[in-house]
């Protein structure tokens, strides 16, 4: 695979994630990708009026869900991803956001 192929694969993954998440009323607001950091990326999304940051560590394949805490972000969940699988990631993100809302709002 050529270097530019990884970037194309990333944006295909993000497009699929955006579609899957939007079908569950999760809106993507901001995104960053770094090919040179093992393909790590993050995005900020909004669900039920609350902002979350989803962070993917490309070196360790660790997906973290964070909630906005003023100027900082607080981890609320993490998941060891098997690969860059949009179905697995979207499912985990949606379930983590649902669980967080239930824990915070009863």
Image (cartoon, grey):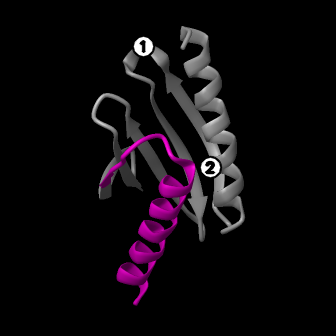
Residue at x 56%, y 56% (from the top left corner): 87
Residue placed most toward the observer, 24 or 103: 24
- Mark 1 secondary-structure assignment: helix
According to the picture, the residue beneath numbered tag 2 turns out to be 17
**Circles 2 and 1 in contact, beta carbons < 8 Å:** no
According to the picture, the residue beneath numbered tag 1 turns out to be 36
Q: Residue 13: where, in percent of width, then height?
A: 61, 39
How crowded pointer 1 is (Cα within 10 Å; few <14, some 14-19, many 20+) is rated as: few
Q: Residue 4: where, in percent of width, then height?
A: 60, 12
Residue at x 72%, y 65% (from the top left corner): 23
Residue 14 occupies quadrant: top right
Residue at x 39%, y 51% (from the top left corner): 70
Q: Is residue 39 left or right of residue 50?
A: left
Q: Residue 40: where, in percent of width, then height?
A: 42, 29
Q: Which residues are magenta?
A: 79-106
- Mark 2 secondary-structure assignment: helix
């Amino acid at each position: 695979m050529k270097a530019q192929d990884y970037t194309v694969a990333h944006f295909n993954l993000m497009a699929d994630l955006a579609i899957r998440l939007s079908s569950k009323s999760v809106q993507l607001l901001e995104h960053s990708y770094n090919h040179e950091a093992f393909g790590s990326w993050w995005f900020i999304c909004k669900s039920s009026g609350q902002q979350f940051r989803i962070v993917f560590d490309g070196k360790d394949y660790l997906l973290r869900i964070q909630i906005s805490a003023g100027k900082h972000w607080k981890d609320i969940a993490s998941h060891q991803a098997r690969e860059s699988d949009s179905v697995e990631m979207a499912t985990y993100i949606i379930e983590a956001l649902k669980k967080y809302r239930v824990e915070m709002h009863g």
